[in-house]
Amino acid sequence: MAVATAPDRKGIGGSIRRIEDARLLSGRSTFIADIGRPGIWEVAFLRSPVAHANLVHLEKPAGAEDRVFFLADLGAILPIRADSQAPGFRRSDYPAIADGKVRFVGEPIAICLGRTRGEAEDLAQAVLVDYDELPAVADIAQSRNPDLPPIHPGWSENVFLESRVDVGDVDAARAAAALSLTRRYRMNRQAIVSLEGRGVVTYRDERTGELVVYSSTQFPHVIRTALAECLGMKERELRVVAPEVGGSFGVKNNLNPEELALAALTRRTGKALRWVEDRREHLIASAHAREHRYEVTVHADGEGRVLGLEATIEVDAGAYSVWPWTAPMEAGMAIGFLPGPYAITSYRATALTCASNKSPLGPYRGVGRPGACFAIERTMDEIAAALGLDPVEVRLRNYVRPDQFPWKSAGGKTYDIGDYGASARAARDMIRPERVAALRQEHAGSDWRIGIGYATYLEQTAHGTAEWVQRGLPVVFGYEQAEIHMTADGMLVMDVPIQNHGQGLETTLAQVAHDELGIDPAQVVVRHGDTSLAPYGMGTFASRSMVMSGGAVGRACEALAAKIRKIGAHLLQVTEENVRLKDGEVVAAGGASVPLAEIAMAAYLHPERLPDTVEPGLSVIASYRTARDTGAWSYGTHAVLVAVDTGTGLVEILDYAIAHDCGTIVNPMIVDGQMMGGLAQGIGTALYEEMPYSEDGQPLASTFMDYLVPGAPEVPRARIEHLSIPSPITRYGIKGMGEGGAIPPPAAICNAVNDALRPLGAAIDETPLTPDRIIRALMAPQAGEAGA
Amino acid sequence: MTGFEIVEPESLEEAFRLLDPEDPAVRPIGGGTALMLMMKAQIYKPERLVSLRRLDGRFSGIDIAADGSGFRIGAMTTFSMLEHSPAIRRHLPVIAQTMKTLANVRVRNVASVGGNLAHADPHLDLPPVWVALGARAVVVGPRGERTIPVEAIFEGYYETSLANDELIAELEVPVRAGWDALYVKVTTRAAHDWPALGLAVSAELEGRRIRDLRLVLSAAVDKPTRLAAAEAVLRGAEIGPATLRAAGEAAVAETEIESDSRGSAAYKQHLLRVHLGRAIEALAAKRV
């Protein structure tokens, strides 16, 4: 279905310029580090330099006792407790600052105050800490080693949870299979790099009686609830504000110990405090991501149709279960999503969530799915290679067909609608595999090898109550609200509890308002990220905001439109059925019109002009949830052409094509931008980003010199095709799409590299595909034999 | 960050007075691009920094000898000045080529030639190039001055042969007719990564015969290191696959390469073999 992209279109489907960009591009906006208070103290955390130790003795520097604070100095405060409802889950209490023990390098031990950050850091270095070091659990393989100490009290092994899936008849599939393959895959641990790090400002507002917490977060209302519980305060005593947030990607989607620590200290001392995370803290102490290992066995018939799938999945979730996601969510997503877009009915898998002395694992763009996609999409290529079939053809034989929706997957998910084959064919048409032979000819005799790779992904978005209950989280993210007001001069102010940290939501929500009210998006102001402004809501994550907040805004605008039409019809002396909203006016069938400003003036300042049946005021609060709450499923296929330098192991991306379906598109330009941003991070996972730890639990990439994110030279401009089948379960047919771009690039790129190396007998199944690993793969014995 | 003082002497005598060879918290500062990072990371905590930026005379300027036989380059010359000097571009094009992948314009605008050498971080790009070009450094101190080959500055990771009260004042760089040079910055990951190895090559070629050459390896080793054994294999030899392979093996045999986050030792050895051959071939291709 073609999307209307007429350049003059302002509503849904129009590529209008982003309203929020003027303030961002001119550097005028306000981030955490821009927020000050009279007498504010700068905070530096003393962080653990060791991975696992009991704190035997803590001592404040002489003369600075009133500027150094340990946990006992913070008053009554509960640890962060993110319990999964899954049976067998092992609990980990995450204290705001260390409670007698440290469990990863970077864990906060003390809060130190200074008039400058430098002064606070110097003070942190002067704190005396006596560590009784314990052996560190630094690798998944050690999580069940009985010789290593338990990370948390009462644990019998360093495992948060083991879960299982067994559906269909895998044994029958194995018996019937013409081909059974076993492969091992690894997606290594990453940091989650946002341009702006985390940060918190806390102070007491004596006028309102509120403890004010500014935090660079994705979900202020939820943070307020969590803080209230940990601090034993009433929600009304807390105000949480997310100011401008400079990127987050999931890393700001957790209740952080630093948020809790600063709030507690301000409550205790009355001091205004500011903590701005530096890059070293961000890399070692912010939540990490990925670190999946898979052993996949697939059973297929002679035509490449998958009969059954078996898998063992291991995820290293780090030292603590992060709130509200819980430690097992990542592995739970991986086991649920491994069957991918394929009509697999026999599936048996185990997912192990291991604990380690590393920074906790949290959500990162794609959450669980980049790893699952990597494993299943590599496996589809291996089936094709083993049977001598075209990899797209093998996928086409296995996709859930358009007539099979809604499809209940072997992983327990309900896919709503789609044409996965159409995305694969479109991506193949864009990448043009027929040119590979000529390229290989051209580079014959050189060190360059050409390869092509595909990967199809599913992106469950805007999932509601049913899905979150199934995941067993402490909070169920089932809905979203919006509160809208027309001002007395006819502009529209929308207060929403979601958070806009780069997605262009101020623009796209205004486009929704345009469709409902005929108002120019330039006349719409979207305010977000402030518990004092907006009604309760869940925030921005899981590719939910456009669907959920868009739906709530749509419903609120629809209700407001009805009232405006009533007033307009009355002012125009026609019946309500004979007016419509267009271009900022209520227009009668005959052509007479009255501007919104005049209607607003009547509603607020001249009630005598209102019909008897209409109450003054133009405010609406509405909530929204999707018709079915198992998610709106975006999907797509990425296709990539690479050249591999077999001399150095470097991978060059020659061409990249994306064909995807995210339902009705609100703003095609913004969707393209989201796709490119996701692709950049996916390329990071595929080729560059890795957070290695030493055997004793030291993080080995604590600066950007060691932790590499792709820069402009590493990210090609992808060609993007939108397929756009509207979702049957959401208002406007929108599907979320914030994460999809980041899900399949590791799989597609790894498939392409393996395609290039296959004639040499070499295989690589670990991200990032560093040149070092590629050369090792080329030098592995089996590669030598096949190449000889 | 604790407080410190920064002083800007205008004469060499004053600079020597302000420096204290016995006190590690007193250090000279050139452009400061490396020192500031160390200070931010709290690796280095100075009490006094003696800036050399107001020292003029021999510490600044780029001059070419009247007969064109060489350059004199003041130690406080910034990378940008080198990069944009028409004379350097003409006679030492390898310098302009190296600048293309060296840090970014903000760093190049302040980083100084002398500070870059005195810092003695083996990952830096220019030091191996100076060594390949046969450059010499003029070192001044309270007890007089001496001129040494640039390679003699380096003793190891961040370690130099300079006394604590000695300053690099200028470089002398010969312009050798018939010689050509290039620098290969091998980043194993993204383009902006630090090099896994740097390879500077200068050579005098006669067709595909190598009359003379200098091979210098950096980044993978603890200091810019001449590859004497590999040079010996290639000196006087015809360029061909067997010779280049032999030179690569000699280079690997004569160096001690360690594993780090940019690659394992085995991988960097492999890169050395591959890039040494490719660099010689690239030089030969330029001459044709």
Image (tube, coloured by chain):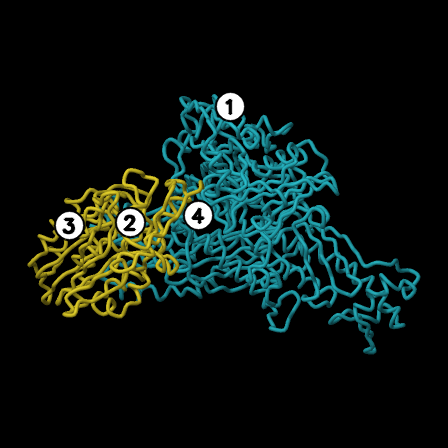
Chain colours: A cyan, B yellow
| Residue closest to the eye, A329 or A442 | A329
| Res. A374 mark | 4
Separation of marks 3 and 1 at Cα, in angstroms: 56 Å
Secondary structure under tag 3 reads loop
Query: Marks 4 and 3: same chain?
Result: no
Separation of marks 4 and 2 at Cα, in angstroms: 35 Å
Residue at 69% in and 60% down? A525
Amino acid under disc 1: Trp
Are the two marked residues, 4 and 3, in contact with CB atoms closer than 8 angstroms? no
Tell whether A658 sits left or right of A470: left
Residue at 45% in and 36% down? A314
Query: Marks 3 and 1: same chain?
Result: no
x, y (%) of residue B270?
22, 48
Give the residue pinned by disc 1: A155
Mark 1 packing: few (<14 Cα in 10 Å), some, or many (20+)? some
The reply to whether residue A574 is visible in this rendering is yes
